[in-house]
Amino acid sequence: MLAEPSPFPHQGPLEPEQVRGRDHLVADLVARVTSRRVTALVGPRRYGKTSLLRRVAAEVAAGGASVVWVDLYEATSTADLARRFDSALAEARGPVGGTLAAIAARFDLQLGLLGVQLSRRRDERPDPEASFDSLLETLVAGARQTPTVVVVDELPGIDRVEGAAGLLRTKLQHHVQEIGLIFAGSQPSLMRAMFTERSRPFYAQADLVEIGPFSAAAIAEIVTDGFDSTGRDAGDLPGRIHDFTGGHPYRAMQAADAAWRCVAPGSEPRPDTWGRALELLRGETNLACDAIFSGFTTGEKATLRLMAHDDALFGTAAEALSLSAGSARHAVDALVGSGDVVDSDRGRRLVDPVLADWIRRRFPR
Ligand SMILES: Nc1ncnc2c1ncn2[C@@H]1O[C@H](COP(=O)(O)OP(=O)(O)OP(=O)(O)O)[C@@H](O)[C@H]1O
Ligand SMILES: [Mg+2]
């Protein structure tokens, strides 16, 4: 018998119709791109940025606009960037597709083939910089002809390639009234820096919109609906899941899935259900947490240990870990920069509640 599919998907970005609890944000982003306000969606890793943008893209596409989706995850070179834009243009959704192909032909480009062409012998290979330039020209010209929304996910990928952000900015700057533009990226402080530092090409070019954790009400609705739709009663689990995850979207879905697997169809949670779900979740994430933790520097590890226990970063607990004030400061900056730690109104905390829980268990006080 096939296993019953979980109502709490948590493998990678979701399909547009699976996006839950973000109705206001979806409506806001759709209104923004429709009225051509350049927007940068900022939030920690696994907060649902890509899923949300897929939903926004689906809604604008349903309204008749075209969508070009560029993914710059870990882009490494101009050739790599050119390849990403080439496939984005080749896979454009909606009426702009044909327009783009026709414009590209004027530049001697056949969309979708650049990857192959760039892997030819050196003397037969197109120049990556010229190709990148032509692709951007094509994108802008095409998007000006028919209502188009351009989504650039993982924008900080462009930052690693010298001069690329400046070129993108130059190509786009006179056309932001005509093209719906939305950027997203996973390193919140780098994203913010790209749009708020004077020295950066995109300085003051976009409104920053934050994607936050799920509210307790959103989790209650998502969890209750998922249990109801599969003939189960969620009981007190929504509150438990919110308390444990602090609303971290990916971790909340993972915890909801673990809890759901502990409740048989047609029944409701028992007093030990949450405890069993937590053991399941921990068992499935221990190795990954170990791997994540071992990737930090010594100073960052000590800092994370103190933060996970809500201990001060100076004083006795810090001394016991040989963490100097200077190293702690340095580590906090790096951790905020990488999006592993956030400054919130409740103080600084680890973004990932499952990693925090693992650290507390692995390094008890
Ligand atoms: N609105 C949502 N409804 C339900 N689940 C969500 C939602 N947003 C995020 N999730 C959960 O988080 C997971 C990760 O979502 P997604 O890949 O869109 O996040 P991201 O912010 O783009 O992550 P990354 O930083 O890795 O790019 C999803 O698989 C899902 O489990
Ligand atoms: Mg993403």
Image (cartoon, grey):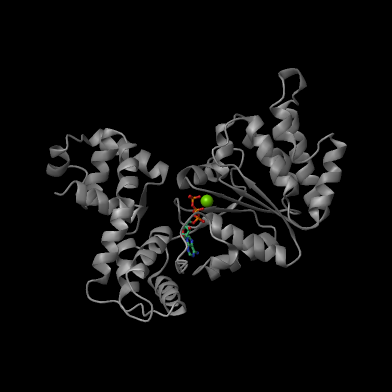
Residue 236 in sight here: yes
Depth order, front residue of 21/320? 21
Q: Residue at x 60, y 29 (%)?
A: 162
Q: Residue at x 53, y 41 (%)?
A: 197
Q: Position of residue 272 (x, y in %)?
A: 22, 71
Q: Position of residue 358 (x, y in %)?
A: 26, 51
Q: Residue at x 69, y 41 (%)?
A: 85
Q: Is residue 108 left or right of residue 247?
A: right
Depth order, front residue of 170/145? 145
Q: Is residue 16 left or right of residue 339?
A: right
Q: Residue at x 59, y 37 (%)?
A: 158
Q: Would you place residue 292 above or below residue 69 in this image? A: above
Q: How many marks?
A: 0
Q: Position of residue 251 (x, y in %)?
A: 38, 59
Residue 199 in sight here: no
Q: Quadrant of residue 78?
A: top right
Q: Would you place residue 318 above or below residue 93 in this image? A: above
Q: Is residue 75 left or right of residue 83?
A: left
Q: Quadrant of residue 101?
A: top right
Q: Position of residue 86 (x, y in %)?
A: 72, 40
Outermost residue, front direction? 1
